[in-house]
Each structure stands twice: as structure tokens, then as C-alpha cells.
Image (cartoon, rainbow, N blue to C red):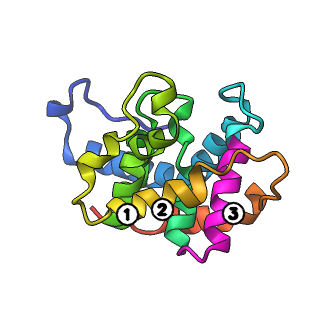
Amino acid sequence: MEKVKFTQMKDGTKEDYDLLSKYEEKFSKDLPDRILDALRNLDSSVDGYQVTRLEHSLQSATRAEKDGADEEMVVATLLHDIGDNLAPYNHSQLVASVLRPYVSEKVYWIMLHHGIFQEYYYAHHIGRDRHAREKFKDHPYYQDAVDFCEKWDQKSFDPDYESYSLEYFEPKVRKLFSKEPNF
């Protein structure tokens, strides 16, 4: 494999950066595969729930799909907890960062803040403020985040719920992460 000549980025040439651009373009095309692998890894995540984090994600996305959410929101809902393994204390920020170049500002904002909105259902049991989300009450996407948590996230821990499979959602994931990023 051909490599750049520099050891410090400031010493790179146009040829070096053209070479890196070629490799980065190829690497970016594999992003849907890495996203799907991150979802599969949720099958061995946090213990104690009645379902795995993968099943929780599938249930959430299935509910969103059945409720008529657009494809972008369905995929975001499927991915909303992919950060649990690497960023258990700020998983919302991780998934929002992954999604940002591919989704609308609304979907990005909901994913960025869903963790604090989800705390409404349990924070008071662990000594935290369940109403912390109220600091966003005047934001235009506040109700959308409330609805995301109420209709899809908080109720998707049911071992008897029949979710769509990851294979069902795979084409939607591939489509979203194959489109040109919007920077």
C-alpha cells in the first residue's frame, strides 16, 4: 500500500493529500458496514434489562416505522443507543455526531438531547432531576424529543414485542450513510 511521505501534517504535499483523499473516500464507502457492526455489538451490552440493547434499538425503530416516521428518523431511532458501549455517560452526543452530516437539524437535535429527555422516566429514582429537560422547553424541537422518548424509546424494553429484524432496516441504514454528507 502506498503511503504519504510526511511525518508531520504540515509537511504534506498536494500528492500526499490526494493519496489520503483516495483512501478516505474508499474508507467512507464502508461506513454503513461499520454502523451495522456497531448495532450488532449492542447485542452484548449493558446487562439487567429484559432485552439486549440491540433488541431495544430494533423495538424503538420498529415503533417509529409503524408510526409513519420518515426514513431518516427511523434510522436515527435505530441508532440512538449505539454510543452505549463507548460513551455510556454521553451516548447521545456520540450518536448525534455520527448522524449529523446525514440528517436534518431536527433529527440531530433530538438525538443530541434524547438522553436528558429519557431521564424523565427514571432520574428521580437515582437522585437526579427528572425535569432537567425543561431547560429546553422553549426550543422548537422540545416536543419532538418528548415524543421520541415517550412513543419509541422508553417503551421499547418488552421481551414480547415483535420487532423488525436488523436485516429489515439494513437497506435504510445503507441508504442514509451512502448519501453525500451535508457539512
Mark 3: give few (<14), some (14-19) or many (20+) Cα within 10 Å: many
Q: Quadrant of residue 157?
A: top right
Mark 2: give few (<14), some (14-19) or many (20+) Cα within 10 Å: some
In the image, farthest residue toward the front: 124
Q: Name the residue at 67% across, 50% down.
A: 156
Which residue carries the number 2 mark? 147
On the question of residue 18 being in view, the answer is yes
Image location (x, y in percent) of residue 140: 26, 66
Which residue carries the number 1 mark? 143
Q: CA distance from mark 2 to mark 3?
A: 15 Å
Image location (x, y in percent) of residue 1: 50, 37
What range is drawn magenta here?
54-70
Residue 112's place in the image compared with 43, above or below, is: below
- What residue type is disc 3 on? Thr
Image location (x, y in percent) of residue 133: 33, 45
SS for tag 2?
helix
Mark 1: give few (<14), some (14-19) or many (20+) Cα within 10 Å: some
- Is 90 on the left-hand or right-hand side of 71? left
- Is 86 on the left-hand or right-hand side of 131? right
**Depth check, front residue: 128 or 76:** 128
SS for tag 1?
helix
Q: Name the residue at 52% across, 49% down.
A: 80
Which residue carries the number 3 mark? 62
Q: Nearer the viewer, mark 1 or mark 3?
A: 1
Q: Nearer the viewer, mark 2 or mark 3?
A: 2
